[in-house]
Amino acid sequence: MVLSSYPSSLLLRVHRHSVSVRIVDPKMAQEDGSPVTSSAMYFPGLGSPYPWLSPGIGSPYPWLRELKSEERGLCLIQLLQGCAHHVASGSIDQANVWLEQISQLASAGGDTMQRIAAYFTEALADRMLKGLPGLYKALNSTKLSSVAEEIHIKRLFFELCPFLKLSYVISNQAIVEAMEGEKMVHIIDLHSFEPAQWINLIQTLNARPEGPPHLRITGIHEQKEVLDQMAARLIEEAEKYDIPFQFNPIVSKLENLDVESLRVKTGEALAVCSVLQLHSLLATDDDVNRRKSPLATKNLQKVMHINQLTLGEWLEKDPISVYSLSPDSSLSPLSLGASPKMGSFLTALWGLSPKLMVITEQESNHNGHTLMDRIMEALHYYAALFDCLESTVSRASMERQKVEKMLFGEEIKNIISCEGTDRKERHEKLEKWILRLELSGFGRVQLSYHGRMQAKKMLRDCGYDGYEIKEDNGCLVICWHDRPLFSVSAWRFRRYE
């Protein structure tokens, strides 16, 4: 692990204070299981390297609590790496020692690094407890899960961070442009819980020179009451502008959705909108043997009927690479095609002939093959998200703490603690979604300059500093400084030759 891969905010602190750091490489280990380290870790005025580098020494010295913020942050990074290494290798006793040390420095109400450490240690401990199923079940038997609370937390995230607002602005602009001149518009919302996006669209469509279309929105959610609230709010808004409107609720989890129940009518121009949802379908495919899946062969046969340009420059430069990549390669069509649930779902959507499909996903790879890969990628990703909140919201804010604990913290726990079909947060990067969607028969639609300018204007008008909107292969990537966090891409139905 090299220093340059740490979050930019931490890098700045390191260079400003000229701190020399020992970086633990979790992918390397000595024969006795202890981590291999690079250059020594020293801090001004502290003399020798930190004593916890020797395993099994017990609790840390009291002076650790007196470290400055920058020094403490670097300590926590190293401790988290070491603890993660022991959890991944099954060294529970060693991991317990490191968790005890981290607990002296981590705090859910502290600075950015202290908060991150608190939720990562909780996730690591949760994974350790699952090795004792009786104890784990006893400790979790009385936990309550409230859909209303989950919706509340997501709406707090919508209010505190600009990411969902930006996704809605970009998606709506793409829909308006694609539906120009259409008299009947049908939108399928794959996770219908936030009316703000569609209220904005109703207002925009009402201002069309040719007048508003007949608008039908199919909302999908597992809770009927959520859809009832969506329907009431959107019908109210449509009546205000006298727009012909219909809301079609479908109570279903995404993985159980019967696409035929979407009831697309002849003459309707269809748009599909997915915000942070598609990655969850990858969990269903976890137990499938990728090398033997017949869908892999089927998708490779599809590729042969698609114009070479539709697979992007990668295949244009080297078409034979479709076959030369191993099935386990992160961008191998064999790997992508061998996801039966995802493949069949995208194929079903393709069969609806959508004029537009807009997809927002987390721009990070939290679906790595090894636990250490997932932990390190998640550490960098969520450090940036916590940094976003640190820049605009008070540390004492209960709203901020709820978002960090019940949204970010639960995602971190799912990425680290869960396996198999329980691990739903399987975020993947844009390049993988591009190839997956092209293999499923979709053609890329370049998001317009106007959509990008609208997103930037929203950031300026709302006073969001530090965010950037970058173009990537016709898609847009939402960044915190230079760190990509979310991607928005647009697609259309394309017939095979």
Image (spheres, helix red, strand yellow):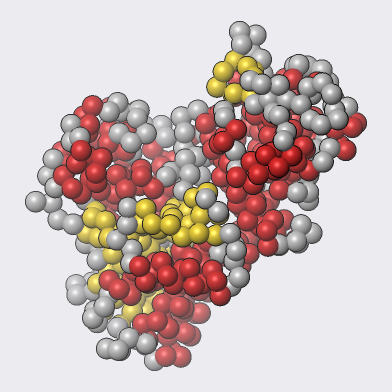
Q: Is residue 445 visible?
A: yes
Look at 57% across and 18% down and name the residue there. 28
Q: Position of residue 94 (x, y in %)?
A: 72, 20
Q: Position of residue 71 (x, y in %)?
A: 77, 37
- Answer with the quarter of the image where residue 178 lies: bottom left
The foreground one among 136 and 233 is 233
Instruction: Classify residue 202 as left or right of residue 66.
Output: left
Instruction: Classify residue 233 as left or right of residue 189.
Output: right
Look at 72% across and 35% down and name the residue there. 18
The foreground one among 283 and 494 is 494
Q: Is residue 222 visible?
A: no
Instruction: Classify residue 428 as left or right of residue 383.
Output: left
Relative to 379, does residue 43 appear above or below in the rendering? above
Look at 48% across and 44% down and name the residue there. 364
- Answer with the quarter of the image where residue 315 lies: top left
Residue at the outermost top position: 31
Relative to 336, does residue 156 appear above or below in the rendering? below
Q: Position of residue 243 (x, y in %)?
A: 37, 87
Q: Position of residue 125 (x, y in %)?
A: 69, 33
